[in-house]
Image (cartoon, helix red, strand yellow):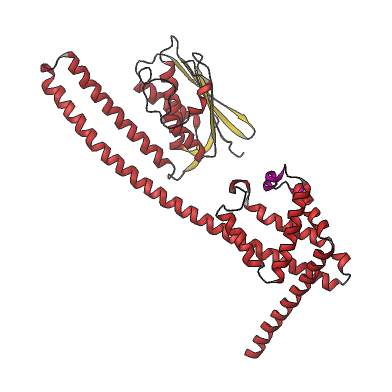
């Protein structure tokens, strides 16, 4: 029984050796008689497939590219003949992985290019099979061996890419854990001195206010006010950092009710706001209800804050449909902003108005953008100084 098993192994090795010999003889025939034609076919096929890597060679003369393509064919056949094909392919893939390909920046070549180049070469070789032999079995053997050869190369490349992706994901997970630990540590370490500053300031206010002049009391109030702002900033930063790790609880969300709840909460906290807020009937959506509530809360809060100083504040919340997406809009008639500073609008700590005019930590819109990114949505704005602002955000519509 064992001898039969070894016989099949020896037979398989023999067949493999013979098929490789047939392939090699065919490729030597190509090398001797049709190398220029195969090089031209490879170049033509490459251009037709619009490989991103070819953009690097757009301004290089065809005769230079052709010479390189011919060299590639010679190297391919030689590496098969001396048995170094696999190790050379792996060396090239490693150079790509380590971003060491001479003159080719890594961000200009996609992993799919590494696979498609093999397909292009294979098609160019196959075109010359009929001129090489009319033997159907020989043709089949050559085609199958070329398929196996390129498939093995592709699998090596794909395995390398998967390993690289897995390592990146593991590194990202470790980084997120470190950031989470850092966030909690920073929160705890910053809050302790802030509580002490606030506590001692409160003692000064309650027990020594009669001994302090107006200027000293004003300084004390400024200290306490800034301590409170710092506490809010820490809270906002923690919310921002935790958002990337929070799992989405997707369900059908009544966006009209969420917007009304946000309006009620904001106006209750902003007692001096005397304007009108209109909430139209909004299209429901599939999303995380809690996070969508935060989106409306931030956008409505901004609209109230920046329109509150106008003579007749007005805010409108509406929705519309476009290209399979639902677009929501929070529009106000407030101070607006200059669109030339638009690139700062959704950044952390980026503010377009001074703290003396409008309070805030500069994290609200960055938080909104991150929430919408988690939902594969988008946010943008339109505005002009003293002509109000309109904030739009889009989400994929519910399937009916």
Viewport quadrant of the C terminus: top right
> Which residue corresponds to the image point at 45% horizontal and 32% vertical from the top-left?
366
Q: Quadrant of residue 382?
A: top right
User: Residue 363 in the image: x percent, y percent?
Assistant: 41, 31
User: Residue 385 in the image: x percent, y percent?
Assistant: 50, 15
Give the magenta range: 48-59
42 lies above or below 107: below
User: Magenta residues: mostly which secondary structure?
Assistant: helix
Whether residue 303 is visible to the viewer of this picture, yes or no, is yes
Front-lying residue, 322 or 124: 124
User: Residue 258 in the image: x percent, y percent?
Assistant: 46, 30
Q: Quadrant of residue 87?
A: bottom right
Front-lying residue, 28 or 224: 28
User: Residue 306 in the image: x percent, y percent?
Assistant: 43, 18
Front-lying residue, 29 or 122: 29
Horizontal side of 15 relative to 198 (left or right) equals right
> Which residue corresponds to the image point at 43% horizontal and 28% vertical from the top-left?
350
Is residue 52 found inside the magenta-colored segment of the image?
yes
Whether residue 1 is visible to the viewer of this picture, yes or no, is no
317 lies above or below 348: above
Horizontal side of 297 relative to 10 (left or right) equals left
């Amino acid at each position: 029984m064992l001898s039969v098993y070894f016989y099949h192994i020896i037979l398989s090795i023999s067949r493999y050796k013979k098929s490789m010999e047939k392939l090699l003889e065919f490729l030597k025939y190509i090398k001797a008689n049709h190398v220029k034609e195969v090089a031209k076919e490879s170049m033509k096929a490459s251009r037709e497939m619009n490989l991103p890597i070819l953009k690097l060679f757009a301004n290089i003369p065809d005769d230079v590219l052709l010479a390189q393509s011919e060299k590639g064919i010679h190297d391919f056949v030689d590496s098969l003949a001396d048995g170094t094909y696999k190790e050379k392919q792996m060396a090239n893939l490693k150079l790509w992985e380590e971003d060491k390909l001479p003159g080719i920046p890594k961000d200009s070549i996609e992993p799919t290019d590494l696979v498609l180049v093999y397909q292009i070469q294979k098609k160019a070789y196959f075109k010359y099979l009929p001129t090489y032999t009319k033997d159907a079995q020989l043709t089949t053997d050559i085609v199958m061996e070329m398929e196996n050869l390129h498939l093995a190369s592709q699998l090596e490349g794909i395995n390398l890419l998967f390993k690289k992706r897995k390592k990146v994901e593991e590194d990202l997970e470790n980084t997120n854990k470190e950031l989470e630990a850092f966030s909690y540590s920073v929160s705890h370490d910053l809050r302790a001195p802030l509580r002490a500053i606030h506590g001692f300031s409160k003692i000064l206010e309650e027990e020594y206010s009669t001994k302090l002049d107006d200027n000293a009391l004003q300084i004390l109030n400024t200290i306490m006010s800034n301590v409170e702002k710092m506490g809010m900033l820490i809270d906002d930063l923690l919310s921002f950092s935790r958002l990337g790790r929070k799992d989405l609880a997707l369900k059908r969300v009544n966006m009209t009710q969420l917007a009304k709840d946000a309006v009620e909460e904001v106006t209750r906290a902003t007692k001096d706001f005397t304007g009108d807020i209109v909430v139209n009937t909004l299209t429901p959506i599939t999303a995380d209800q809690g996070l969508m509530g935060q989106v409306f809360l931030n956008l409505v809060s901004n609209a109230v804050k920046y329109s509150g100083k106008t003579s007749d504040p007005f805010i409108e919340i509406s929705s519309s449909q476009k290209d399979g997406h639902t677009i929501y809009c929070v529009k106000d008639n407030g101070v607006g902003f200059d669109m030339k500073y638009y690139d700062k609008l959704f950044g952390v700590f980026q503010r377009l108005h001074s703290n003396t005019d409008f309070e805030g930590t500069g994290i609200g819109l960055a938080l909104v953008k991150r929430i919408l990114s988690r939902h594969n949505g988008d946010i943008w704005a339109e505005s002009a100084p003293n002509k109000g602002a309109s904030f739009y955000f889009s989400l994929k519509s519910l399937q009916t």
